[in-house]
């Protein structure tokens, strides 16, 4: 489903003058960080929607001729940085008119309420409580562009805490918050045999406590290696039919983790895409990983014992094959060594390091890592 960023103009993109009316080029001044912040957000797969109340636009108190030069200058400046609005919603009424189109009412937003947009994953960004009320009315999340103490007081007084995801006067923090949020996933999978929940933050900043509990102690140990060496926040809770055997639990944990990785990567803009490798004591494990969107799996690792801990060694291959398919990646695994525990652990650690390299995204680079322009 499509997602949108509904962005206020005056006080959010353009600094609002004392008379609250930008009716000349002399009054036009960007809020610090707005241009770079919007440029960063334009690479995240959201539609950018300008949504603004312009009191009395087109009346004698605010002629059209006074509005458009500054507005078009703003659009041209942003366009020069690659920021283009997919839609512009401008309400011209006065507050006293109580028009259905005036924010925080949703009259201007009909096309976004038809079920084709994932509004729960969309944001409203603005500098007023009305923007948070709009977020609540749309079923979206609100970001208030205000100094922290002032903004929290506004949120508390208006009773809109449930709609407010962030209060900050820094566009860089706003962009980073949204970017980071897109790399978090809370995913559940339920079958007749298993109930799985995976929470994942690819940037390692999840606000959930890392908890890994699958009912299989050695699998828990291996998954904790992915979290630690992969630099990710990971929580896995699994309840499976272990009274039958371990197969369904291992398989469904792998599928859910793979799907979580795929979803958290989103468009994959700006990621390194590839990753590999590592030695561990007597063992050597090589993991080649490519999040290119195509699935290919190779496995070169033999185990001489039937089990390591409480996990059958035949399920290590099945775990990574299931994860590979769910994550839509190329995954090639090779390992050799004498100690079977070390061999298994080396594979999981090598995968973790490969994952860490491949999902890394630095700064605000949002190029798709493919000459095709899409993954």
Image (tube, rainbow, N blue to C red):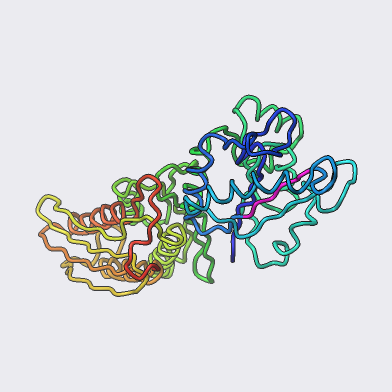
Q: Which SS type dominates the magenta stretch?
A: strand
**Residue in the image at 69% along x and 67% along y:** 115
Give left or right: position of 329 versus 10. Answer: left
Image coords of residue 287 (percent x, y): 22, 62
In the image, is residue 312 above or below residue 164?
below
Q: Quadrant of residue 156?
A: top right
Give 138 or 246, whichever is nearer the viewer.
Answer: 138
User: Which residue is located at x 71 percent, y 54 percent?
Assistant: 89
The reply to whether the magenta stretch includes residue 96 is: no
Quadrant location of residue 247? bottom left
List x then y, in percent, for residue 155. 70, 33
Q: Quadrant of residue 370?
A: bottom left
Q: Does residue 53 belong to the magenta stretch?
A: yes
From the image, which quarter does the N terminus lie in? bottom right
Up/down of 151 relative to 93, above or below:
above
Q: Quadrant of the C terminus?
A: bottom left
Asked if one can make out residue 242 in the rendered structure from this viewpoint, the answer is no
Residue 359 shows in the view: yes
> Which segment is the magenta one?
49-54
In the orientation shown, which residue stands out farthest toward the top?
149
- Residue depicted at 46% across the width and 66% down the height: 241
- In the displayed structure image, the side of residue 80 where residue 93 appears, left or right: right
Q: Position of residue 358 (x, y in %)?
A: 30, 56
Q: Is residue 355 left or right of residue 168?
A: left
Q: Nearer the viewer, residue 73 or 222?
A: 73
Answer left or right for 285 relative to 77.
left
Residue 361 image point, x, y percent: 36, 50
């Amino acid at each position: 489903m499509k997602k949108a960023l509904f962005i206020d103009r005056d006080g959010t993109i353009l600094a609002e003058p004392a008379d609250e009316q930008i009716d000349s080029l002399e009054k036009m001044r960007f809020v610090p960080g707005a241009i770079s912040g919007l440029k960063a957000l334009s690479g995240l797969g959201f539609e950018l929607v300008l949504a603004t109340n312009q009191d009395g636009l087109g009346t004698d108190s605010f002629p059209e001729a006074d509005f458009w030069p500054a507005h078009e200058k703003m659009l041209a400046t942003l366009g020069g940085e690659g920021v283009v609005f997919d839609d512009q919603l401008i309400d011209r009424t006065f507050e006293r008119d109580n028009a259905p189109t005036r924010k925080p009412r949703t009259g201007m937003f009909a096309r976004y309420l038809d079920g084709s947009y994932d509004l729960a994953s969309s944001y409203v960004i603005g500098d007023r409580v009305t923007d948070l009320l709009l977020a609540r009315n749309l079923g979206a999340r609100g970001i208030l562009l205000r100094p922290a103490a002032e903004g929290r007081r506004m949120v508390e007084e208006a009773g809109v805490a449930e709609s407010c995801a962030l209060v900050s006067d820094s566009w860089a923090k706003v962009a980073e918050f949204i970017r980071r949020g897109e790399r978090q996933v809370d995913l559940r999978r339920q079958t007749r045999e298993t109930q799985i929940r995976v929470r994942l933050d690819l940037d390692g900043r999840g606000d959930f406590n890392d908890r890994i509990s699958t009912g299989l102690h050695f699998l828990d140990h291996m998954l904790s290696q992915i979290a630690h060496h992969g630099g990710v926040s990971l929580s896995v809770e699994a309840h499976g039919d272990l009274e039958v055997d371990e197969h369904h639990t291992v398989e469904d944990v792998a599928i859910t983790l793979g799907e979580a990785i795929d979803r958290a990567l989103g468009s994959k803009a700006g990621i390194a895409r590839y990753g590999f490798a590592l030695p561990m004591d007597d063992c050597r494990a090589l993991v080649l990983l490519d999040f290119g969107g195509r699935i290919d799996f190779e496995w070169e690792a033999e185990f001489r014992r039937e089990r390591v801990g409480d996990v059958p060694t035949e399920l290590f291959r099945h775990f990574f094959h299931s994860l590979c398919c769910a994550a839509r990646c190329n995954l090639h695994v090779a390992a050799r060594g004498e100690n079977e525990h070390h061999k298994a652990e080396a594979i999981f650690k090598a995968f973790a390091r490969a994952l860490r390299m491949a999902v890394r995204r630095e700064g605000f680079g949002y190029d798709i890592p493919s000459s095709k322009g899409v993954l």
